Amino acid sequence: MGHAGRARARACTAVVAALVTGGCGEPTAPEDVSFSFYTQVVFGFPSLVTEARVADDHSVVVTGIVRTRHTGYTVLGELDSSGQRALLMSVFATQTSNGLNFPTQNYYAGTIQGLTTGQYNLQVRHIIDHDRTDTVVALRQTVTVR
């Protein structure tokens, strides 16, 4: 299927951005899928489970925390919806400055919109410094859009 059906979005800290590309028109690939991503540094949440919930508007909202070694990281989100009823959300934390030297919790919320009715296999992964060896699969879940 190539790049057809792929929706990607990247956002810098506290900025919401969306980039939409259309689907390939197959009944198993969403045609008008879009993705928005928001992130912000939070304190007092030593752990927060990554979770997904389906909203009434045929969207899926994924929330969680990615931990970084210090405050000098930029957190971006990306969605790959090119698979057959598969959604792969990647959360990248990339060091962009030295920052303050204490462990940091980066809260994120990704919203996937424009999904058709049915079940989707959702996977969320955290990637620190684009190092695939430091990749953590934070969530694997089948979501049902009604």
Image (spheres, rainbow, N blue to C red):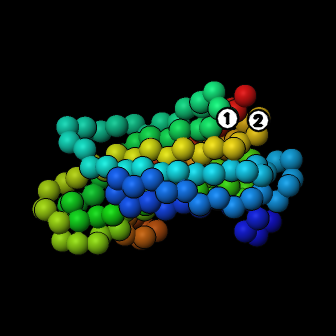
What secondary structure is found at the residue carrying circle 2?
Answer: strand
Position of residue 64 measured from the top left corner of the image (x, y, whole percent): 40, 42
Where is 122 relative to 72, above or below? Answer: above
Of the pair 136 and 13, the residue shown nearer to us: 13
Where's residue 130, x and y in %?
Answer: 42, 70
Q: Is residue 115 left or right of residue 63?
A: right
| Residue 136 is at least partly visible in this image | no
Quick check: 73 left or right of 121? left
Q: Where does the N terminus fall, quadrant-wise?
A: bottom right
Look at 59% across and 60% down and name the residue there. Answer: 19
Q: CA distance from mark 2 to mark 1?
A: 10 Å
Q: Position of residue 122 (x, y in %)?
A: 61, 45
Kindly identify the residue that appears in the image at 23 percent across and 65 percent down.
72
Which residue position holds label 2?
Answer: 118
Q: Amino acid at mark 1?
A: His
Residue drawn at the location 20% of the way across and 37% of the way down: 44
For label 1, the residue is 58
Give neighbour class at mark 2: few <14, some 14-19, many 20+ (Cα, 10 Å). few
Q: Amino acid at mark 2?
A: Gly
Mark 2 or mark 1, whichever is nearer to me: 1
